[in-house]
Image: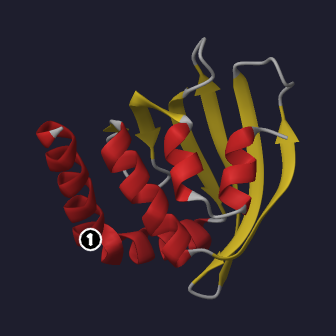
């Protein structure tokens, strides 16, 4: 089982953060522009944990030593059942450098866009606070 899957299933945000490269790029299923960097990616993932209910991974594609993995999931957002997939690519150190999410059906993607849109001020604030804290250290 991929360590990121384990971290998500345990809702362990510290372990999730430890698995991300500093220069990770997150590609959202509902936003055109990818989000570069660990702070915004973690803020988005925390937002996702707040809006997903009944989340579970149902399939994992990729071997233990592979750099590319697909983690298929099911969840509910605002009453809409969603099937999706986390596509992750790791570097030589096992850190996630590319993280792309795709979801279906369209009604589920629309529910996700609405729910995450409502979270986005908080997401930006969390990311900015994380960046500021890192700059102070």
Give the image's coloring scheme. secondary structure
The front one of 118 and 41 is 41
- Is residue 32 visible in this depiction of the protein? no
| Point 26% across, 71% down: residue | 122
Count of picture labels = 1
Q: Is residue 110 above or below residue 19?
A: below
- Among the 4 quarters of the image, the one containing residue 22: top left
- Is residue 7 visible in this depiction of the protein? yes
The front one of 41 and 15 is 15
Seen from this angle, which residue lies furthest bottom?
79
Q: Is residue 124 above or below residue 115?
A: above
* Crowdedness near tag 1: few (<14), some (14–19) or many (≥20) residues, C-alpha within 10 Å: some
**In what element is the residue under mark 1?**
helix
| Point 58% across, 48% down: residue | 15
The answer to whether residue 47 is left or right of residue 92 is left
| Point 75% across, 58% down: residue | 73
Residue 28 spot, x, y in % from top left: 46, 49
The answer to whether residue 103 is left or right of residue 61 is left
The front one of 39 and 103 is 39
Seen from this angle, which residue lies furthest top?
92
The answer to whether residue 26 is left or right of residue 52 is left
| Point 48% across, 57% down: residue | 45
Residue 78 spot, x, y in % from top left: 56, 86
Seen from this angle, which residue lies furthest front?
137
- Among the 4 quarters of the image, the one containing residue 81: bottom right
Residue 6 spot, x, y in % from top left: 75, 51
Q: Which residue is mark 1?
A: 122
Image quadrant holding the C terminus, namely top left
Residue 19 spot, x, y in % from top left: 56, 36
Image quadrant holding the N terminus, namely top right
Q: Is residue 116 above or below residue 27?
A: below
The answer to whether residue 72 is left or right of residue 88 is right
């Amino acid at each position: 089982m991929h360590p990121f899957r384990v971290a998500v299933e345990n809702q362990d945000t510290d372990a999730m953060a430890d698995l991300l490269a500093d220069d990770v790029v997150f590609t959202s299923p509902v936003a055109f522009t990818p989000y570069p960097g660990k702070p915004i990616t973690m803020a988005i993932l925390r937002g996702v944990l707040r809006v997903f209910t009944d989340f579970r991974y149902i399939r994992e594609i990729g071997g233990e030593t592979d750099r590319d993995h697909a983690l298929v999931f099911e969840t509910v957002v605002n009453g809409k059942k969603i099937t999706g997939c986390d596509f992750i690519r790791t570097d030589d150190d096992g850190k996630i450098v590319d993280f792309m999410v795709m979801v279906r059906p369209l009604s589920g993607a629309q529910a996700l866009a609405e729910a995450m849109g409502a979270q986005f001020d908080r997401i930006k604030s969390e990311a900015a606070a994380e960046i500021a804290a890192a700059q102070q250290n």
